Image (spheres, rainbow, N blue to C red):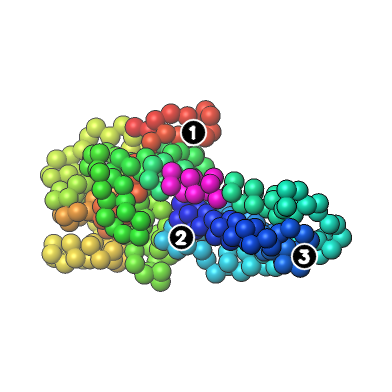
Amino acid sequence: MEEKLFWIGVLMGGHLFLSHHFREKGKFKDNSRFTRVWHAIFAALVSFIGMVLLTVSLDNRRGDVVTSMLFSGRQLVYGALAALAGASYAYWRSFSSTPPVKDGLNAAMKEDMEWSETVFSAVLLASVVMYLFIQAFKIPSGSMEKTFLIGDHLFVNKFIYGFRIPYTQKKIVKFRPVKKGDIVVFQFPSLDPREFQCGGSQYGKDFIKRVVGMPGDTVEVREGQLYVNGAKIADEPYAQYADQFRYPKASGKTAPGDYQVYWENRLLGKMFSEYIRDNFGPVVVPAGQYMVMGDNRDRSCDSRYWGAVPENLIKGKAWFTYWPPSRMGFPH
């Protein structure tokens, strides 16, 4: 969302810059055709931005937002239709009323420029804050119950693991590394939009899970119980097991080396389906990657099924639940 806001800010900034340029050239002193057209362009811009943000918001509610994509084709089409409608209406209205000229400037253009400056400043500031510092996130599923419930809104601390340089995978000024037990928000580790995991394409979507395995750790699940480096992890007050039933081990034998390769290539979920929910591994978490699982262990599609999460895809750490008010607080 922050990159969307950034480019919306750039778009509005471009309009503001050109408006000042045309004003200096004396283009907006009367209700000329050029003034009416430029006012219509402003209306088109506002309509486009409004419609795009509305469709992004609706897609976000349905869980259809792909964070690795700037705008979808459908969002752009709806935005273009709204822009055409807005421009047509503004141009038609310009013939029915003649705005007064104040201080050598058409009143309508003065108002347009004021709004352009306000939107440009607000949107650009919001995009910088969301990109570098804090971002809002909505829980889309029950995989983290009861730490988070479906519909919970929380803030994500994006700078704790370092500031990411725009359009790169590099981070600078890291305040601390990712630690075991951290609840992290990350982009799903898939490079192919056609790859299906968890019942559909997860390409470019944001997930939230808890880190259970660090780089180099050996992770295993036996009868639903988590083991790390051969030791049973008994102290997990956040973990929830909704089913009494436990899946048996998958039939057939797979060599440990092949099992590791299948896991790293996100194939285990496709090969063994739900059988790896309760009996998984052992696998070794690759360097620079992390094993993550949902707190609702029996209702979570996580690293057991689709592999580890590379560090460069981790966006931040869950920080504070702000909605609903009854659930406000810092997660543990």
Q: Position of residue 157 (x, y in %)?
A: 37, 40
Residue nearest the viewer, comparing 253 with 163: 163
**How far apart in space, not on screen, are marks 1 and 3 (Cα)?**
50 Å
In the image, taking residue 133 as reference, residue 106 lies left or right, namely: right
Residue type beneath disc 1: Tyr
Which of the 4 image quarters holds residue 17?
bottom right
Query: For the point 64% across and 67% down, which residue is it?
Result: 80
Residue type beneath disc 3: Ser
Image disc number at residue 322: 1
Find disc 2 in the rendering and name its residue.
66
Helix, strand or loop for disc 3: loop
**Mark 3 nearby-residue class (10 Å; few <14, some 14–19, many ≥20):** some
Query: For the point 49% across and 33% down, which residue is it?
Result: 322
Q: What type of secondary structure mainly makes up the magenta span?
A: helix
In the image, which residues are magenta?
119-130
Looking at the image, tell me whether mark 3 or mark 2 is earlier in sequence order.
Answer: 3
